[in-house]
Amino acid sequence: MKKLLLSVLVALAVVSCSNDSNEESLDAINNDGLQLAAARKCHANENYEKMLLDPSFQQKVLEIEEQTEQFTNEFMSKKKPVRGGGGGGDGTPPADNLGVINIPVYVHVIYSNANENISDAQINSQISVLNADFRKSNSDAAQVPTQFAGLASDTEIQFNLVGVTRKSSTRTSWGTNDAMKSAANGGVDVVDPANAMNIWVCNIGGGILGYAQFPGGSASTDGIVVGPQYFGNTGYLSVPFDGGRTTTHEVGHYLNLRHIWGDGRCNRDDFVSDTPTSDRANYGCPSYPTTNCRSTDMTMNYMDYVDDSCMYMFSTGQKARMRSLFASGGVRASLNN
Ligand code: ARG
Ligand code: ZN
Ligand code: CA
């Protein structure tokens, strides 16, 4: 417990996107990519940093981490009920008794031109991508290298579109200060955040693909934001972020996942034990194996910064971390429907 508290506090102090290891990783890519990548530096984390200035949020984060650690330890040792015993399991760990988790989703489209007013088909394609990625039915799951194949997990979390709102606006870019989440600021108010995940689809600007609010924050801004051209995998899209994985990545943050490299040097943790340590984000489509911190990076993880077609797994440890939020008393338990 003491160790956990200490490491969380240390991580809170340094969750930062402008650290030197991140800068190093930017050197490796070309000019176009450099600009994009520089602009793409972890806006979910910037949002998180702002939240962390609030002492009551710090306390909330420590409580969430405590529950997460306890749940994860149990999850890794608990056995699935044996097949025929009603559970359909095989008697091996890991497991919990939560079953498949269902999350209702509201999508708010805020547009300043016809392209940004994305079609229902594009919205539905995003829900399909989310379900495929979180249920490990994505067609590229087979590309996971043998080294990590046993860790690639069906998170048993799925998503169900329950409402779409559309709003025309003269504003052409929205930034990352949550203005799109407030009708008073020209955006659209959050709908039923205790029982549903809200996604605002609008142009953020500055080359930012998306950002998320981590669990434990204000209900009025809870949810994720994604640019229209990075949403779904059919319609108005921008290569190489045309596979719907920006939303998969941001939902990962919304369910408390950190970036795979822990946003820092080799000793900085993402609080997931089965994701190898790294000291940098990876971009583009890295060749396998990519070695940092004397271990092979899990570059194909949704929580790295690679292109959409080069990310295709969550790990078992990430599954446990996300599912812990839905256990009794968990901050996102009321979402499960
Ligand atoms: N928050 C990140 C950004 O805006 C999202 C990265 C998503 N990566 C992807 N391949 N779609 O840069
Ligand atoms: Zn991120
Ligand atoms: Ca790790």
Image: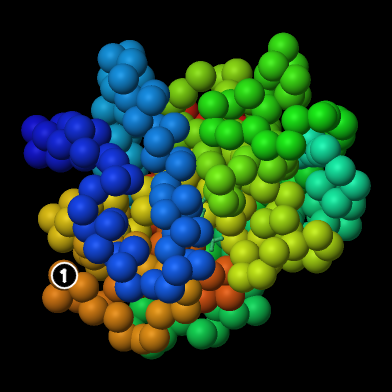
Q: Residue at x 53, y 42 (%)?
A: 211
Label 1 sits on a secondary structure element that is loop
Of all residues, the one furthest to the left in this rendering is 2
Q: Is residue 188 visible?
A: yes
User: At which x and y percent is residue 47?
Assistant: 44, 32
- At label 1, the amino acid type is Cys
In this view, the residue in front, 33 or 337, is 33
Q: Quadrant of residue 58?
A: top left
Q: Is residue 175 above or below residue 146?
A: above
Q: Is residue 116 above or below residue 148?
A: above
Of all residues, the one furthest to the front in this rendering is 31
Q: In the image, 264: left or right of 183?
A: left
In this view, the residue in front, 287 or 18, is 18
Q: Which quarter of the figure is the N terminus placed in? A: top left
Q: Is residue 132 visible?
A: no
How many marks on residues? Answer: 1
User: At which x and y percent is residue 245?
Assistant: 60, 61
Q: In the image, 316: left or right of 242?
A: left
User: At which x and y percent is residue 48?
Assistant: 39, 32
Q: In the image, 310: left or right of 336?
A: left
Q: Residue at x 33, y 73 (%)?
A: 28
Q: In the image, is the residue at mark 1 within 8 Å of ligand 3 by its beta carbon?
A: no
User: At which x and y percent is residue 74?
Assistant: 30, 48
Q: Is residue 236 above or below residue 27?
A: above
- State how the image is colored: rainbow
Q: In the image, 122: left or right of 173?
A: right
Question: For mark 1, does the 10 Å Cα neighbourhood hold few (<14), some (14 to 19), or many (20 or more) residues?
Answer: some
Residue that mark 1 sits on? 293
Q: Residue at x 79, y 35 (%)?
A: 110
Q: Which quarter of the figure is the C terminus placed in? A: top right
Q: Residue at x 35, y 20 (%)?
A: 57
